[in-house]
Image: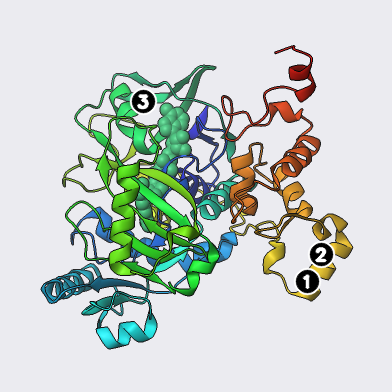
Amino acid sequence: MYDVIIIGAGVVGSLIARALSRYRLKILLLDKAWDVGEGTTKANTAIVHAGYDAKPGTLKAKLNVAGNALYDQVCGELDVDFERCGTYVVALSSEELPLLEELRARGRENGVPGLSILSAEEMFRREPALNPATKGALHAPGGGLVDPFGLCIGAAENAVLNGVELRLGTLVSGILRQGDEIGGVITPGGAIRARWTIIAAGLWADELMASAGLSGFHITPRKGEYFVLDKVAAEQVRSVLFPCPTPISKGILVTRTIHGNVLLGPNAADVDDKEDLRTTAAGLDEVLAGALKLVPSLDTRQVIRTFAGLRAAGSGGPVAGDFYIDIPAGTRGLLVLAGIESPGLTASPAIAEYVVDLLREAGLKLEERPDYNPQRRAIPRFSELSTAEREALIALDPRYGRVICRCETVTEGEIVAACHGPIPARTYDALKRRTRVGTGRCQGAFDLPRVLQIMSRELGVSPLELTKQGPGSPFLLRRTKEVQDGAV
Ligand SMILES: Cc1cc2nc3c(=O)[nH]c(=O)nc-3n(C[C@H](O)[C@H](O)[C@H](O)COP(=O)(O)OP(=O)(O)OC[C@H]3O[C@@H](n4cnc5c(N)ncnc54)[C@H](O)[C@@H]3O)c2cc1C
């Protein structure tokens, strides 16, 4: 019997697990995927929004602003890359200028500090490659960039180090309910009982709610597609450039990433399939056209990757389109988080605190553990160290002197550390999110065989067993010799 089961180890579930690990509770964090952060958390724009977008008075507005304010502390404690570089909403015509005023007024109502409207001249000084048609921009100095994988992994590792049990590859197929009482979850391995069950399942929250007997909430997957550009493109883009927003999205933006690439996207298109992460020619054309409006000189020869993410667009709780975070009426022992679309990443640290408050108000006894440690250290990132730091690290472990991924300067030492971390990287994608291996210009083309060799050695499995993201995604099918021998 657990005190709390959390379904979903995305950034939201992982930060909730971490927040609850401060107390004397027996907690289980479950995910059907083979690493944490394999859902929407791995495919988004990675912006820490300032908070001028959401409708005043909504949970989205409140938790966006509160979440943004927590980023310095949370990323400091968890050793996660975060930069409060400021963001801009650019007006490309005089007709759009009143929209900037509107956003500023909304932001002020939401409590966003420091918003100002800058002239076109000032914007060209700050972002010389911006469209010459620019008429002005809203500047939000509190907006920023984060490593979303790093935040999720950091939170989940910190939770595990503080005693939370993590089970990956565990699908929750149903919720145990008897009368009003929710008693835990059903998995292929059997029922697991808990006093409290928390649904933090992203796109699948509505289906789990239905399984708990709660109908009426519907999640529509809303696809957003992206281009990733090589780091050389960052000479043209210094910060985060939004166009003026549309009713369903913040628009197609051009932004630097926390690790120095440039990201173009996302568009927004409703789809039926919650697993459909394919990019489409039409979607990518739309993204490119949108991005070129902001920075006309972008060069498509610098594209190194495309990807898509799915927003969990919810039908809303009391307010349509708002986050739904509540203990549903007529149930005991269930807390639901649904419709956590953008700015869910930004809001996630505040969502975790909000959930703790809801549980406390509902009577969960929260007694602080004296040994709770909010700090977690990421594995060393060789490429970011000074020469003296590199030498010291190599003296300690010579494997840090062997560069495996040449584009991102990732060493064998980092790969080994990721394979033996508090949540070991057991798939290539898990390793990629922890070390940046294979994320550069060659996208792993040069280093994949050597990476698989090291993973196989460290994890004690055959290279044939290694996968991209779990069962069903193998890299290697059989030994070449077997093909030659006609043993196919
Ligand atoms: C295109 C796009 C752009 C975005 N840009 C931004 C941005 O710039 N800034 C921002 O603040 N937000 C942004 N967001 C929103 C942000 O990414 C999400 O709000 C956030 O990642 C949601 O995290 P989550 O933990 O709720 O969901 P997820 O990351 O999806 O996690 C849910 C987890 O639940 C697991 N799960 C589901 N069902 C089950 C089950 N039955 N059993 C076991 N496990 C299950 C899944 O495997 C998954 O790991 C964007 C989203 C998209 C799609």
Residue 151, visible in the rendered structure:
yes
* Distance between mark 3 and mark 1 Cα atoms: 52 Å
* Distance between mark 2 and mark 3 Cα atoms: 50 Å
Q: Quadrant of residue 89?
A: bottom left
Q: Secondary structure beneath disc 1?
A: helix
Q: Which residue, given by chain and number where applicable, does mark 3 sit on?
A: 182
Tag 3: amino acid: Ile
Mark 3, Cα crowd under 10 Å, few <14 / some 14-19 / many 20+, is many
Q: Secondary structure beneath disc 2?
A: helix
Q: Position of residue 320 (x, y in %)?
A: 16, 45
Q: Is label 3 in contact with label 1 (beta carbons under 8 Å)?
A: no
**Which of the two marks, 3 or 1, is nearer to us in this view?**
1
Q: Is label 2 in contact with label 3 (beta carbons under 8 Å)?
A: no
Q: Secondary structure beneath disc 3?
A: strand
Tag 2: amino acid: Leu
Identify the residue shown where x is 50% and y is 43%. 37
Q: Nearer the viewer, residue 73 or 470?
A: 470
Q: Which residue, given by chain and number where applicable, does mark 1 sit on?
A: 389
Position of 227 relative to 188 (above/below): below
Mark 2, Cα crowd under 10 Å, few <14 / some 14-19 / many 20+, is some
Disc ID at residue 426 = none
Q: Position of residue 377 (x, y in %)?
A: 66, 59
